Image: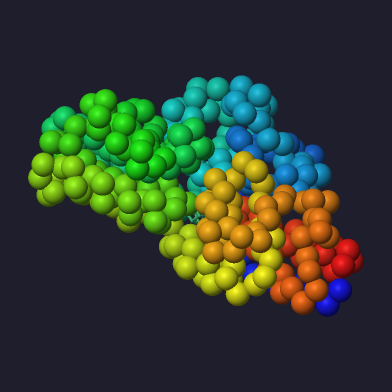
Amino acid sequence: MNISVEIDARSGFCGGVIRAIEGAEKFLAEHPGEPLYSLGEIVHNEEELNRLSARGLKSISRLEEADATVLIRAHGEAPQTYQKAKRLGIPIKDFTCPVVLKLQESIRDAYSRVKTEGGAVVIFGRRGHAEILGLQGQTDGKAVVVESVEMMKEAVASGAVDVSRPIELFSQTTGSPSVYAAVQDYLGCVMSDRNLLKVHSTICSQVLSRHEQLSEFAFSHEVIIFVSGRQSSNGKVLFDLCRAVNSRSYLISSAEEVDPEWFRDGDRIGICGATSTPRWLLQEIASKILQLV
Ligand code: SF4
């Protein structure tokens, strides 16, 4: 079969994830025999987790499981996590992405402004996601999290968000720009005084530019193989974007899932991934496709 395979030059880990992984590898190299625990998966990608686990990085879900240094990943943590680590005497290596740190600080400041006026901090993002938990923690858990315009409408209807009071709106760093814009539009329409709404542009610039470029990439190939861990919220958003412009888009997390039935003679196949997908995995999948067809 005559096909061509192209790996998206812009796919691969974002700066925050690279920083955390390189930091973990450096720590493990400098402390041979010493364990390093990651509070939650350092990256939502099983293949990369296996590679790091072979070097000594262990994922834990609770601080109590650690008996040595704990790494805070790029998503960041709520203040309570740092307080607890201090109480338990657990050393921390903090690799919270600087962009997330800045967002946490902005949310803290916003909360101190609105809480005395009966207002609300609203965060657009995935409920329960690690970054969101860290952001909510800046507001004593009081920030309202919405994943869609429908959830925003529900929050207004139930009185969880009072549209006659100040509202400061933020997005998770990996949120979908188009859905965030729709949430802003909705709030702008229902607020009695538009000046009470303060919108913060907090989608990461790396994610914003990826959205524009990835649409073009998906459109210019007959088939898109999107590689991402199933847990990655950024992966889900970017895969949906590919599928919206190219119906022959397939989501996989490893080379074993490639199906030769997806390809036809003359196809140009594009391989791309989320901010948590390693480039070596994209290359492995490209080789697998070329072997199969
Ligand atoms: S997407 Fe942006 S903000 Fe989020 S971890 Fe990566 S670099 Fe940091």
Choose between 85 and 222: the one closer to the eye: 222
Image side of residue 196 versus residue 200, left or right: left
Choose between 59 and 27: the one closer to the eye: 59
Seen in the picture, residue 65 relative to 269 is either above or below; the reply is above
Choose between 10 and 16: the one closer to the eye: 10
Picture coordinates of residue 161, whole percent (x, y): 24, 32
* Residue that sits furthest to the left in the current view: 193
Choose between 267 and 112: the one closer to the eye: 267
Seen in the picture, residue 75 relative to 218 is either above or below; the reply is above
How is the protein colored in the picture? Answer: rainbow
Whether residue 152 is visible here, answered yes or no, is yes
Picture coordinates of residue 206, whole percent (x, y): 48, 63
Quadrant of the drawing holding the N terminus: bottom right
Seen in the picture, residue 130 relative to 172 is either above or below; the reply is above
Instruction: Locate residue 14: give its quadrant.
Output: bottom right
Quadrant of the drawing holding the C terminus: bottom right
| Figure disc tally | 0
**Residue at left offset 74%, top offset 38%:** 34
**Residue at left offset 49%, top offset 63%:** 211
**Residue at left offset 46%, top offset 34%:** 127
**Residue at left offset 36%, top offset 28%:** 141
Image side of residue 132 versus residue 72, left or right: left
Picture coordinates of residue 64, whole percent (x, y): 61, 22
Whether residue 143 is visible here, answered yes or no, is no
Image side of residue 96 versus residue 188, left or right: right
